[in-house]
Amino acid sequence: MNFNNITIIGVGLIGSSFALALKERGFKGSITGVGRREEYLARAKEKGIIDRYATVYEEGVKDADLIILASPVGQFEQIINRIGSSIKKGAIVTDVGSVKADIIKKIEPLMPEGVSFVGGHPIAGKECPGFDAAIPDLFKNAKCIITPSYNTDKDALQKIRDLWETVEARIVLMSPEEHDMIFAAVSHLPHVVAYALVNSITEMKDGILDNGGKGLKDMTRIALSPTELWRDICACNQKEILASLKTFSSSLSGMIELIEASDWVGLEKEFRRAKEARQSIESD
């Protein structure tokens, strides 16, 4: 392990699961949780998720070898502006956000001399926020996307790779831009569609949602995700999310046209094409 003092800003599901994962795998250093609510942080400490906590962000990071940004991505720039002068030389800052290009563009120039930023995104999570939902094996066998830029320090990059491998994640390297295009399609689009689907059903008739079964619950589970988090993701990855939504809208319009034309053969062909694509990822 390359780090002795780790600070996690945002002791939610991902940050807490990461702390538990490290502890279960033998981490002997100190983990500090930083956030706005002292009562919440004190409970996380009582549960053994973190060893110390701070509500004064500058105090919470001053001894850290590693700082993990695990708050909503829309807060990152403000946080770095706040703590920048308190980060010690040689420290590494990383994140777990699902948007990369916009974040890296904003955060890298704010790094103090001798401090490195390495973008990261573990592909793991639940719709339930908070440390009560945290588990130490959340990242086991999950992909973790690491997105170095042209400015990323190679030694810092290797240390972050080693860190995620410690919690048994599978490392994938890609550019920030490729990451944002891919995850606009496979993650951001489904979340926006889930929110829209629930809203459209509730607008059809009062109380109709209560008649939905397991299939509807499975399709809309991610609409239980924290709305502040997804608002920020849409703001930070607006261009790619809009492109994905327009592609989805075109596909949906095509199905509407097939149903209007009573083209059941054509409709089944579209259903079959989707089913076969879905089957290809069933074993992942």
Image (cartoon, grey):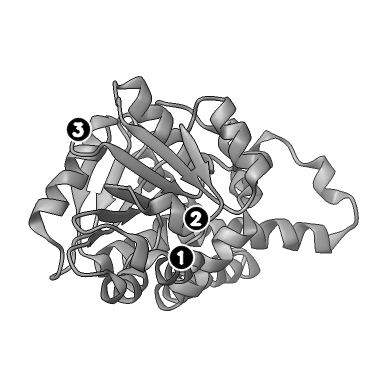
Percent coordinates x, y for residue 3 in the rendering: 23, 39
Q: How far is mark 1 from mark 2, CA to CA?
A: 9 Å
Question: Which of the two residues, 140 or 48, is positioned nearer the viewer here?
Answer: 48
Provide the secondary structure element on which disc 3 rests.
Answer: loop
Residue positioned most to the right: 206
Badge 1 crowding class, 10 Å Cα cut-off, few under 14, some 14 to 19, many 20 or more, is: some
The numbered mark, 1 or 2, whose residue comes first in the sequence reads 2
Label 1 residue SS: helix
Q: Which residue is mark 1?
A: 79
- 184, 37: nearer the viewer: 37
The three-letter code of the residue at mark 1 reads Ile
Question: Does 252 sit above or below residue 54?
Answer: below
Q: Position of residue 147 (x, y in %)?
A: 23, 59
Q: Does residue 274 appear to the left or right of 47 in the view shown?
A: left
**Of callouts 2 and 3, which one flags the residue occurring earlier in the amino acid sequence?**
3
Structural crowding at the residue carrying mark 3, measured as other residues with C-alpha within 10 Å and reported as few (<14), some (14–19) or many (≥20):
few
Residue 212 location, quadrant = top right
Q: Nearer the viewer, residue 157 or 81?
A: 81
Residue lying at the far left of the rendered structure: 154
Q: Residue at x 27, y 57 (%)?
A: 88
Kindly report which numbered mark, 1 or 2, lies closer to the viewer in this rendering.
Answer: 1
For mark 2, what is the residue? 71
